[in-house]
């Protein structure tokens, strides 16, 4: 069980000091609940890693993991930066009142409209991914006679120890400028020659859910070597995110902040050995900030017991609110909210209510005896759950609640049935 799991003397699950069963009753299920204190703690732990190493830098929360205005407000309160990847995320940040100079903008296919919007909103740093984007940005800046801080995303050629779908740092990737073929150098030369481009440095992101530091260190080393070979003293090296978290008791990973501290020390060493002043180091953690803080609460519904085969237990959510198990066999664990450590009665396959056989939340979950109406909490669902939610089978996207210090509040209203049809239009062919 995660260290931060709160359980009262009656063996009931608390989230942010509130009974999970009360949250389920008040807001209905399926429900996403975030323990805000857990997120704050992780944000502070990352900042502490920089303080411990006396390293200048920034922790940019990669909000693709979980984005909404309230989350951006917490990120702002904690003094972090934001790493954003779409016009929608930028819009959310602007409307949340987030300081836009603390925003970096990633992504592999930013259109001219996307870039113009980012410039209009005063995005601090654009992380330029490819030559098409670079040319679009150059034209926009020249037209506006405006200077923009940029960073080049490069592909360090590092294969991280993780699932294939979430590897992004290897050579055969859709992201970033390639090193071997000279693309990165060419981009660097273009930036040097353009008075409107203020090149801060380089960025690399090698993948997600990574526990070993060697891949990160190698990527950091490649960036340092590259700068040295260009005689370029960067102001920033951005080492991306991807720090792994424990989804189940099988995982006993290093704490993400320890991994980051080791990485910072490694970059400091690399720079010292190569005679570079160590630049500011930026990191972009997403999952490690929001993942462990999130709970998905479901109500138990039907079941199907197949003697000698397995027991299926169905809950009122599933792949629409958490696609990760179906998408890349992600593993989770769950507890019965009113008997967290209750005596195990059976092992079930926890499934959702969507019309797909692949709608499995947890392949094998040991649980106490359950009955319809019981509340199940799937743990560590705070990253890439809500943010990847769909309306598959025309199920509304659930409510998101923040809980902290015994108080709870809706931060994203759940969709209603009326919301589901609100963008539908009756079909009536008319001559244009
Ligand atoms: C460029 C970049 N930065 C940061 C992240 C965040 O990764 P994670 O949520 O695993 O920390 C991602 C995730 O895909 C990414 O692509």
Image: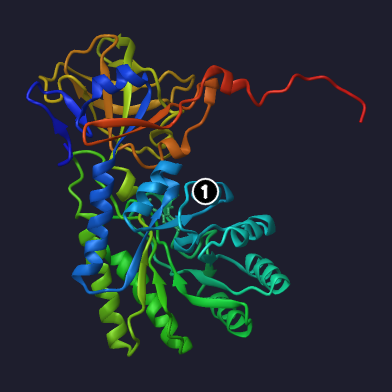
- The quarter of the picture where the C terminus appears is top right
User: The N terminus appears in which quarter of the rendering?
Assistant: top left
Residue at 58% across / 22% down in the picture?
Answer: 420
Q: Is residue 114 above or below residue 11?
A: below
Q: From the viewer's side, name the closer residue of 329 and 310.
A: 329
Check disc 1 and report its element: helix, strand or loop: helix
Left/right of residue 425 with respect to residue 169 in the rendered view: right
Give coordinates of residue 235: x percent, y percent. 42, 79
Relative height, residue 63 to residue 334 (above, below): below
User: Which x, y percent locates residue 151?
Assistant: 50, 71
Quarter of the rendering containing residue 267 = bottom left
Residue 369 relative to residue 160: left or right: left
Which quarter of the figure has residue 301?
Answer: top left
**Quadrant hosting ligand 1:** bottom left
Q: Residue at x 16, y 17 (%)?
A: 368
Which residue is at the front of the view, 93 or 281?
A: 93
Report the residue marked by disc 1: 89
Give the number of callouts. 1
Residue 135 in picture, x, y percent from top left: 68, 70
Q: Left or right? Give the position of 311 relative to 432.
A: left
Single out the residue that lies furthest toward the front: 97
How far from the left and from the top, in percent, is residue 198?
54, 77
Q: Is residue 229 above or below residue 282?
A: below
What residue appears at the point 27 percent right and 49 percent down from the top-left corner? 40
Q: Is residue 112 shown to the viewer in this render?
A: yes
């Amino acid at each position: 069980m995660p260290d931060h799991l709160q359980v009262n003397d009656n063996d009931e699950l608390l989230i942010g000091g509130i009974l999970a069963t009360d949250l389920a009753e008040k807001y209905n299920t399926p429900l996403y609940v975030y323990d805000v204190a857990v997120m704050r703690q992780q944000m502070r732990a990352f900042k502490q890693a920089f303080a411990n190493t006396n390293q200048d830098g920034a922790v940019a929360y990669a909000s693709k993991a979980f984005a909404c205005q309230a989350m951006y407000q917490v990120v702002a309160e904690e003094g972090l930066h934001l790493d954003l990847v779409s016009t929608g995320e930028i819009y959310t940040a602007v409307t949340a009142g987030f300081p836009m100079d603390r925003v970096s903008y990633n992504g592999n296919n930013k259109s001219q409209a996307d870039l113009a919007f980012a410039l209009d909103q005063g995005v601090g740093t654009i992380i330029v991914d490819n030559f098409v984007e670079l040319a679009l940005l150059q034209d926009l800046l020249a037209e506006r006679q405006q200077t923009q801080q940029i960073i080049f995303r490069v592909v360090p050629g590092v294969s991280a120890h993780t699932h294939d779908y979430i590897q992004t740092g290897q050579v055969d990737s859709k992201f970033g400028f390639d090193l071997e073929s000279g693309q990165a150098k060419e981009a660097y030369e273009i930036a040097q020659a353009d008075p409107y481009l203020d090149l801060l440095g380089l960025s690399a992101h090698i993948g997600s859910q990574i526990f070993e530091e060697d891949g990160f260190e190698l990527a950091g080393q490649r960036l340092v070597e590259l700068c040295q070979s260009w005689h370029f003293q960067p102001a920033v090296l951005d080492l991306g995110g991807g720090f792994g978290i424990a989804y189940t008791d099988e995982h006993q990973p290093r704490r993400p902040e320890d991994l980051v501290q080791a990485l910072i020390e490694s970059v400091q060493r690399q720079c010292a050995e190569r005679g570079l002043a160590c630049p500011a180091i930026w990191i972009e953690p997403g999952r490690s900030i929001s993942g462990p803080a999130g709970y998905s609460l479901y109500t138990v519904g039907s079941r199907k017991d197949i003697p000698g085969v397995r027991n299926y237990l169905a809950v009122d959510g599933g792949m629409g609110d958490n696609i990760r198990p179906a998408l890349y066999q992600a593993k989770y664990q769950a507890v019965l909210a009113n008997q967290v450590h209750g005596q195990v009665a059976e092992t079930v396959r926890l499934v959702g209510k969507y019309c797909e056989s692949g709608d499995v939340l947890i392949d094998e979950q040991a649980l106490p005896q359950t009955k319809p109406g019981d509340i199940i909490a799937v743990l560590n669902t705070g990253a890439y759950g809500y943010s990847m939610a769909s309306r598959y089978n025309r199920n509304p996207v659930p409510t998101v609640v923040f809980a902290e210090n015994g108080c709870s509040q809706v931060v994203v209203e759940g969709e209603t049935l009326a919301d589901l049809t609100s963008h539908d239009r009756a079909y009536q062919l008319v001559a244009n």
